[in-house]
Image (tube, grey):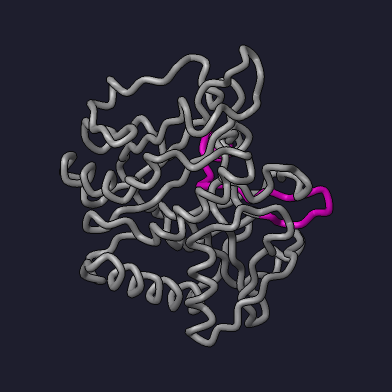
Amino acid sequence: MNDPSRVAGACGWIDGVVLPVHEIRLSAFDRTLLYGLGAFETVRLFGGKAYLLDRHLARLKRSLGSMQLPIPKAAHEISAGLSILAERNASPEAMARITVTAGTSSENEGTGAAEGDEGMHVIIGLREVAPVPPHVVVGVTSFAPSSHSPLAGVKSTNYLVHYMLRERAEAEGRTDDLMVDANGHITEATVANVFCVAGGRLLTPPVSHGILPGVTRARVLELAADEGLGPVEEPLHRSDLKHVDECFLTGAGKCLLQVDTVDGRALPKPRPYSARLRTALARDIAMNCAVPQDQLDF
């Protein structure tokens, strides 16, 4: 798994201050530790620049608002913090984890919001980019968060279920697993969004099914429209996986990862939709982060 302990460099950032990672401290009573109350974003750095950072920060603010948490002052320094860390750690190519903690409550055991952003922290750490697996195997797990959950669509630090499902998939030799809701509909992978191509149509599950509205997912939908590929957001049933011609995962870290085997079925080659969109995404990253397109590795 993309283990956060695989740090890229020795320094982290907390509330505007760069410190050795082992010196970053939180209160044992921070509500992020007690209840999972907090939000995070993961962004990928190319040439020291964070791809789609503005969109990630907008989602971070929405997640905090969904949990009735204010935006701490230090959040306005995130962009500068990322640049400082990339330079200080000599890690222009890295994954950055941005975490906003809820801080301590004014009540001993309460979960109510503290006054303002008192006690909240903004923490940034870098880790190495995981290598692209030579053969991408994706299974299916009979679990998905409810679309009626108050955390549906929220990138919260309450992430244990996704973590455990991803750990199990990797322990059993798979890259990831697709989650299936009570109606048999595919929602998303444990840490990524999913796209399929069937009958010449590019499909992805709708946000209304409780999936996380992925930043990379949204950009791929835009690029697909620009490429004339006519993307469609509609429900995907597990049985549809028997007929798909292509499948790929999207996320900040993996960008666009073509799937070779899904639910025990090897997918045919070539994969024109995946290849075309990967090229479009690489072109977009190169333009936005000012890096050579032919040097991108994802």
Tell which residue pokes out farthest to the top in this image. 108
| In this picture, residue 148 sits left or right of residue 27 | right
Residue at the spot 57% in from the left edge and 51% down from the top edge: 62
Q: Residue 85 falls in which quadrant of the image?
A: top left
Q: Which residues are magenta?
A: 166-187
The residue nearer to you, when weighing 266 against 23, is 23
Quadrant, the C terminus:
bottom left
Residue 93 visible in the displayed image: yes
Question: Is 164 on the left-hand or right-hand side of 72?
Answer: right
Q: Position of residue 69 (x, y in %)?
A: 57, 38
Q: Is residue 50 left or right of residue 141?
A: left
| Residue at 53 percent of width and 66 percent of height | 218
Residue 175 on image: x %, y %: 50, 47
Q: Nearer the viewer, residue 21 or 264?
A: 21
| Quadrant of the rendering where the N terminus is positioned | top left
For the point 43% across and 74% down, the residue is 275
Classify 247 as above or below 124. Answer: below
- In the image, taking residue 149 as reference, residue 261 lies left or right, namely left
